[in-house]
Image: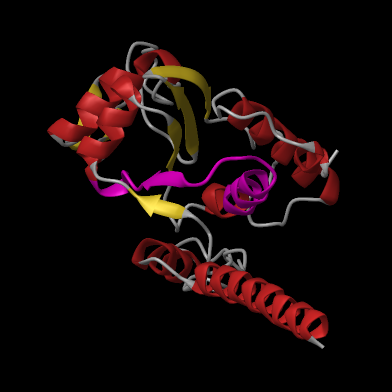
Amino acid sequence: MIKKAVIKVSLLIILGVISSIFIYYKVGKSDITSDEKRFKVEYESLNNQKDASGNTYLSLDIDKNNNFVYATFDEIKEIITKGDGVIYFGHPENPWCRLIVPVLIEAMENTDLDEIYYFDADDIRDIKELDANGKINILKEGTTEYYELVDLLKDYLPSYQGLNDEAIKRIYFPTVIFVKDGQIVASDSSILNEKENPYTPLSDEEQRLFVNKMIENINNIVDSVCDDECNSSN
């Protein structure tokens, strides 16, 4: 009888531990940060809306636990100069960004990356154009912070289109920067160049190719080697 009682108590303890782990896991997974909620709302609020040109934005369904972190200028600068991480420069109204967000999320889910730092530089960027005489006109001046970011990233940014001056750089959306120990390992502002129309969804093949490219870049900066799950989209 004593032996049976001991076994019964042991089983109850084991079941209790398993239940605790299950509850802890579920609670942890259900926690949503303010940044995750904000990111989801900002991008999903434009679902099926039209832009200024009359094009309909792609509809996005972003998981509540999306692991995007809104970073300040100082935090972005800290990562670029001496930190680690993936930085996504984007804007919800940019149709190309709406294509790349699901790519980033899927790539993150298939690697050991815990979060992606998000920085919307739309309000701080400059706007320039070339007039009929070949003179560059500044329609909107960028902020000091923006020009500092451009200077930090100048070797990885494309030239400002339409100005006929390769020395003038710009942060276009989307731009994704991969940083390890304060060194930029990879930068991608052209991952969607092969896509002609940003208002149409990626095909399964396009999604697979772009996700794999992101996974490759992420794995170059994460410390631990991913398992077979990292290759699930191959």
Residue lying at the far left in this picture: please name it.
144
Viewer-side residue, 205 vs 224: 224
Please give the range of residues in magenta: 100-123
Residue lying at the far bottom in this picture: please name it.
1
Residue at 59% across, 31% down: 218
- Residue 111 is one of the magenta-drawn residues: yes
Q: Tell me where residue 11 appears, x and y as whole percent.
A: 75, 78
State how the image is colored. secondary structure
Residue at 64% across, 34% down: 214
Q: Tell me where residue 206 appears, x and y as whole percent.
A: 78, 42
- The answer to whether residue 104 of the structure is visible from this angle is yes
In the displayed structure, 195 sits above or below 101; it is above
Q: Is 186 displayed left or right of 85 in the figure?
A: right
- The answer to whether residue 50 of the structure is visible from this angle is no
* Quadrant showing the N terminus: bottom right
Viewer-side residue, 178 vs 15: 15
Residue at 48% across, 52% down: 94
